[in-house]
Amino acid sequence: MARASFRSAFAGLPRATRGILWMVMAAFFYAGAYVAARQSVKNLSVPEVAFLRSLLIAAVMLAWISRSGFASLRTRRIGLHTLRAAFTYAAMLAWVYAVGHMRISDVTAINFSSPLFTVLFTFLFLGEAVGPHRLAALVFGFLGVLLILRPVGVEFALPALSALASAALFAASHGSARALGSSENANAMVFYLFGLAALMGLGPALLAWKTPGWADMAWLGMLAATTLFAQQGLTRALIAAPASLVMPFNFLQLPIVAVFGLVLFGEVSDIWTWGGAVVIFGSSYYIARRESRNARSADAAMRESTL
């Protein structure tokens, strides 16, 4: 009864609000994935971690979908599913490499540039409108990321470039998800994403294969679980609301990852990191506040037009 009431109340929220809440959930689980990825790549190769993570998630999704039948897997857009999987697989390779060679808070900060790529891609390829206020807030958010990185003194080493590449590739994947969301089942989108990514990653994984131990499998299981829940939240967020609205709330990863990095790996985030975080969160709050005000104005106008 309580579960049904919660679902009913959640479904009654504005689409923008639901999208934001889904993205907040995704941010928490993505933060957990940083820890699992760091531990997984200690003993296993990057291609093997990327492959096994995708394979485990695809297997779980297939079992879940089988409970209600496989009709939801029917699609006429396998090409776009494949393109999205390619973006995600390449992003995962770059991301795992970066996580294994940098402070996880640094990787998180660099990946915060992803919303800027998302805005660019959705504007260029999907025709999604981006107003000046939202765009300005995103620019300030990126300035916050620059404050964290202090690029004047940063060497553009391979791990940093890998982290930046993963941000752009994840943004391309997010744009593809937005395009698919109008016609595809959410569970099917997640299954095709990781099933196709596993097929793409099989060959590279075999070339660098090392049989994982029990501890490795435990971390891989955690990586798969956190990624699955995060991806579910992300997919539903992008279906419920424009990508340029929900993606800034991915910034919530930073304080969570900073705590994980300090407690588990002894990584200390300095004042520049927190200063940048204030700018980023301020930008996110401004976007949410303005969108909420616009939604209320639109609802009021709709009610007046029906009187």
Image (spheres, helix red, strand yellow):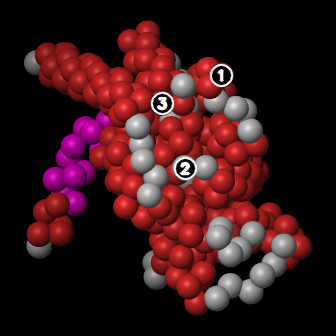
**Residue 153 rendering spot, x and y as whole percentages:** 62, 25
Q: Which residue is mark 3?
A: 148
- Residues at marks 1 and 2 touching, judged by CB atoms closer than 8 Å: no
From the image, give the main secondary structure of the stretch colored magenta. helix
- From this viewpoint, is residue 294 visible? yes
Q: Which residues are magenta?
A: 7-18
Instruction: Identify the element where label 2 is drawn.
Output: loop
Q: Residues within 10 Å of mark 1 (few under 14, many from 20)?
A: few
Precedes in sequence: disc 1 or disc 2 = 2
Q: Which amino acid type corresponds to the residue marked 1 in the rendered image?
A: Leu
Q: Name which quarter of the figure residue 100 lies in.
A: bottom right
**Residue 36 rendering spot, x and y as whole percentages:** 52, 67
Q: Residues within 10 Å of mark 3 (few under 14, many from 20)?
A: many
Precedes in sequence: disc 1 or disc 3 = 1
Residue depicted at 30% across the width and 46% down the height: 21
Q: Which amino acid type corresponds to the residue marked 3 in the rendered image?
A: Ile
CA–CA distance between discs 1 and 3?
28 Å
Return the residue nearer the eye: 274 or 256.
Answer: 274
- Residues at marks 1 and 3 touching, judged by CB atoms closer than 8 Å: no
- From this viewpoint, is residue 57 visible? no
Which one is in front in this view, the residue at disc 1 or the one at disc 2? Answer: 2
Return the residue nearer the eye: 6 or 281.
Answer: 281
Return the residue nearer the eye: 57 or 34.
Answer: 34
Q: Name which quarter of the figure residue 114 lies in.
A: top right
Q: Which residue is mark 1?
A: 124
Q: Which amino acid type corresponds to the residue marked 2 in the rendered image?
A: Arg
**Residue 262 rendering spot, x and y as whole percentages:** 39, 55
Instruction: Identify the element where label 1 is drawn.
Output: helix
Residue depicted at 48% across the width and 78% down the height: 64
Q: Which residue is mark 2?
A: 103
Residue depicted at 43% across the width and 18% down the height: 140
Q: Residue furthest bottom?
A: 214
